[in-house]
Image: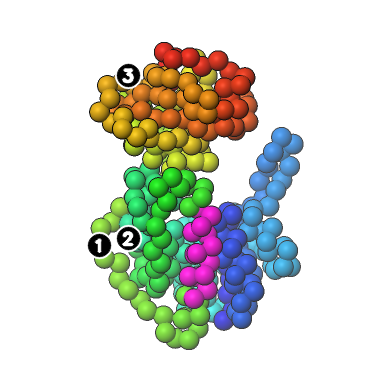
Amino acid sequence: MKLVFMGTPDFAVPSLRKLITSQHEVAAVVTGPDKPAGRGRKMRPTPVKKTAMEFNLPVLTPAKFLDEKFISALKEFQADLFVVVAFRILPKQVFTIPLYGTINLHSSLLPKYRGAAPINWVIINGEKETGVTTFFLEEKVDTGEWILQEKVSIGENETAGELHDRLSEIGAEVLLETVNLIDQGNAPRIKQEGEVSKAPKLNKELCRINWSKEAVTVFNQIRGLSPYPGAYSLLKKKVVKIFRAEVESGTSAQSVEPGKVISVEKEKILVGTGNGILAITELQPENRRRMTTAEYLRGSAVSPGDRFV
């Protein structure tokens, strides 16, 4: 099949590579515009664009999807199918161009966790299982008939970043299988049924830790926001991002003051919560690099009685 691939971030790169090296033809790639990054604010291409350039593929970076020149350029490729992975919302005038329509790879088991941040929210909510879904695009976001799903167990201590990387590789395999089924005329079209839940964009308010919540809730928040954008708290009026923590076993019934440092050990800082104690094991102090708690404690004084707020 002749394909046009649409995507922007790192998550989409394994899918693009998988399709490029398959029997199908990726005729072009649509991605976001270059953006300034780093200290020098130099313009950098998206991860998807970098991959497309590696294979000398035509790249389109439209500012507006309804621009006549963009739509005309898309039609000229005469693609059989558009493939979308982690991209912007497409208007109907675009996703209905190909003969076989447009498919999307979504990193959840639809209809659960529709929205922009499913990987983060499944961990924040303490889910034990998630997966990937391929589906045909329709006007309402993430509502189209699904084609394939693959379930994935979530590790007890797995972070959003680790799950992101696993799902990007698993999703690439499922996506190629989906394209193969469409090419063979054997792709199922299954109506989404069951519990619907949302996975909205993350915001700064969500990232601040409320230590009055249960230890396991704070633990899930930390790993669900690690490594980006990162859960944070204030210690001595300075921002501290927390990337890894552990729930101290056998402490759920212990009466402690939320946010108060209970003790400081060689490799962890024990902090009280609304129910139980959390051990901080990896963090990033304000204006410094990410580090283990052991590294942090070698250069910073933290004492029992100090407070995270």
- What residue is disc 1 on? 194
Q: Are marks 1 and 2 in contact (CB under 8 Å)?
A: yes
Q: Which comes sooner in the sequence, label 1 or label 2?
A: 2
- What residue is disc 2 on? 111
Q: Are marks 3 and 2 in contact (CB under 8 Å)?
A: no
| Mark 1 crowdedness (10 Å alpha carbons): few <14, some 14-19, many ≥20 | few
| Mark 2 crowdedness (10 Å alpha carbons): few <14, some 14-19, many ≥20 | some
What span is in magenta?
Answer: 164-177
- What residue is disc 3 on? 257
| Mark 3 crowdedness (10 Å alpha carbons): few <14, some 14-19, many ≥20 | some
x, y percent for residue 233? 45, 25
Q: Write the residue at 55% across / 15% down.
A: 301
Q: Which comes sooner in the sequence, label 3 or label 1?
A: 1
Q: Is residue 93 visible?
A: no
Q: Nearer the viewer, mark 3 or mark 2?
A: 3
How many angstroms separate mark 3 from mark 1 (CA)? Answer: 41 Å
- Say what amino acid the circle numbered 1 marks: Gly
Q: Nearer the viewer, residue 192 or 223?
A: 223
